[in-house]
Amino acid sequence: MSDADQPTPHQLSSAEVRKVATLARLALSDEQIENARHQLAGVLALMDQLRGLDLADVEPMTHPGGQVNRLDDDAPSADHQRTVLGPEALGRIAPMTDGPFVVIPKVIGGDDGGGA
Amino acid sequence: MPEIAHVELKVGLEVHVELSTRTKMFTRAANVAHADHFDAEPNTLIDPVVLGLPGALPVMNRAAVERSVMVGLALNCRIAPMSRWDRKSYFYPDLPKNYQISQYQLPLCFDGSVELPPMSAEGKVNYAAIAEASEAGGQLARTRIGIIRAHLEEDAGKLLHEAPGGHAIEGTLADYNRAGTPLLEIVTQPDFRTSDEVVVFCRWLRDVCRFVGATEGILQRGHMRFEPNINCVLKLSDGRTVKTPIVEIKNLNSFKAVQGAIEYELREQPGRWIRDGREMTPGSKTTRGWDDARNETFVQREKEEADDYRYFLDPDLLPVVMSVEAVERIRAALPELPLVRATRYLREYGLSPKEAAALVEERDVCLMYDAAIEHGVSLGLERGRAAKLAANAILQSGAKRANERSTPERAVLVSGLGISSEQIAEIMVLRDRGEISAQSADELFGLLCEMGGEAMGASPREVATRRGMLIVRDDAALDKWCDQVIAANAKVAEDVRSGKLQAVGRLVGEAMKLAGGSADAKTVRETLLKKLGQG
């Protein structure tokens, strides 16, 4: 890291915390925002501390444990068959249904599959 | 204000391909993009993993990974020795678990390139032209399109804004059958300069994905969705160059829409720049949809920035490690792609470029063609002869019947007519030995198609025998038919006797009628001429 030797303590603004909260669909009071602002600053300070370490010779770790490739065969197993659900089961956990469908509040813009 | 002296189009493409595996990406619930489940009732292909219920854990689908690598190899990509899974935070009711599993930092396939094939007059991939050029020892000048990455992710569910049948609804209806379908996202460099180039790439990509068995590729069902990123480089009269902001068009599912959307933006963007002066800067990209009826693009929601998705490593999934051996194993299993196949048909079998191109248009048809040749060879036909006879059978008798049965909604292929490659090979042998006439061979082909299920395993020879199609080698019968015809057509017979040889054609036709197609026209002609003193 080029700036590793110049750690700067991070202070988040209330607006930044509010934006992150909105993205996470969390409704926070002013008091909670202020609280989160300090807690997040603590997390970022720890990151700054880590940036100060010399990690040039360390392989990036993408996953703990060193395990890889848990792959399933492309076939419906008997085991899996027991977990298959249908519209009735879905209807029991959905707030509102219409036939086999789940009813959700009108989606703005009518966008289908926005993120995929 | 300077004027725009020249407009150059720049397009990069994102393509989402729904893989046709039997089960979903991270669970063994049935996959709606597999032909067995196309018309599954709403919300029947779901389980705790699809719905993101507490405690449900994802497990990767081996076939989805392998087929993605196949497509990656066909795009000349490098295959990552290790790739991993990220969560894309995403609150939208089409994905109930509130994130999409994707590959953000380490995609499975990356850094590839494709030589763009030429387009035919009908707007299809012109395999014939490339095959011909390579046969002549040369190469066509072809545009190179860089492939940035091809990564795996999962599809979202489907939202319906009006109820099936059209009755009014208060909210939006969600069907989660599609949620979790394996999705391969292919991203190109902005190397396209015309909408034709983009369309021919899309068509070629569809052919390749279908050939390797990655997808059914039915565009109407959304198996492939195209998202062009379009902008223009404007050269101004004062010598300056400006770039218009990038517009991404979402979710196009026809080649016509891809072409229309790009042409529309090419027309509009210079004018937009004149009106608002906005240029390409970080964050200036906008997202638009395509209105098929009005033939124009329209503004959609403002896209969230990548940072807003707060990607992070999915703790539930292990990394994907692809050893060199594993990649080579997949490479070895890669089927022959359309272009290589067309070139081989030209070179080894002496087919015409048009015949070769017609055969490779559909994977199932050329697999049937190859199988018919193999069966023909095993029945004693010389390979080149078998190749020619099989091409005739499929492109004439087969294509004719496939066309008859096709509707605008549903194309029927020769491979879907009900006749098997073994049966085609037997017809080829009957024809090659002169045991049936060309006309009977075509009729026999049709009969075996019409017999449908009951013809499964039916022997073409038996059917031909039952229907009296086999050519009679009985000289006595042939003599009798010829004598009858000569007696009944004394005037024509006299013409032939006096040297008007072309008049014999009429007598041959009459004799064939008497024989009910069971005589060989050439033998009939020879016999008649002999009897009339011209043999």
Image: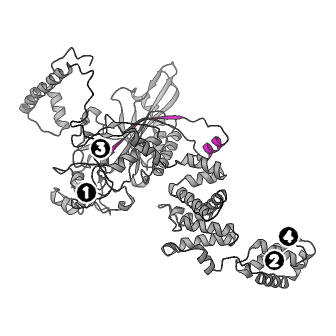
Examine the image and state in which quarter residue B168 appears: bottom left
Examine the image and state in which quarter residue B242 appears: top left
Tag 2 subunit? B
Q: Which residue is mark 4?
A: B502
Specify the amino acid type for callout 2. Leu
Specify the amino acid type for callout 3. Asn
The structure's colour scheme is one colour
Left or right: B534, with B393 as reference point: right
| Dot in front, 3 or 2 | 3
Left or right: B236, with A37 as reference point: right
The residues bearing labels 1 and 4 have C-alpha atoms spaced at a distance of 73 Å
Within 10 Å of disc 4 (Cα), the crowding (few <14, some 14-19, many 20+) is few
| Residue B533 lies in the magenta stretch | no
Viewer-side residue, A34 vs B306: B306
Where does residue B483 sit, x and y in percent of width and height? 83, 84
Q: Which residue is mark 2?
A: B507
User: Which secondary structure lies at badge 3?
Assistant: loop
Q: Are marks 1 and 2 in contact (CB under 8 Å)?
A: no
Specify the amino acid type for callout 4. Gln
Where does the magenta region start and end?
B128-154
Tag 3 subunit? A
| Residue B150 lies in the magenta stretch | yes
Q: Residue furthest left?
A: A31
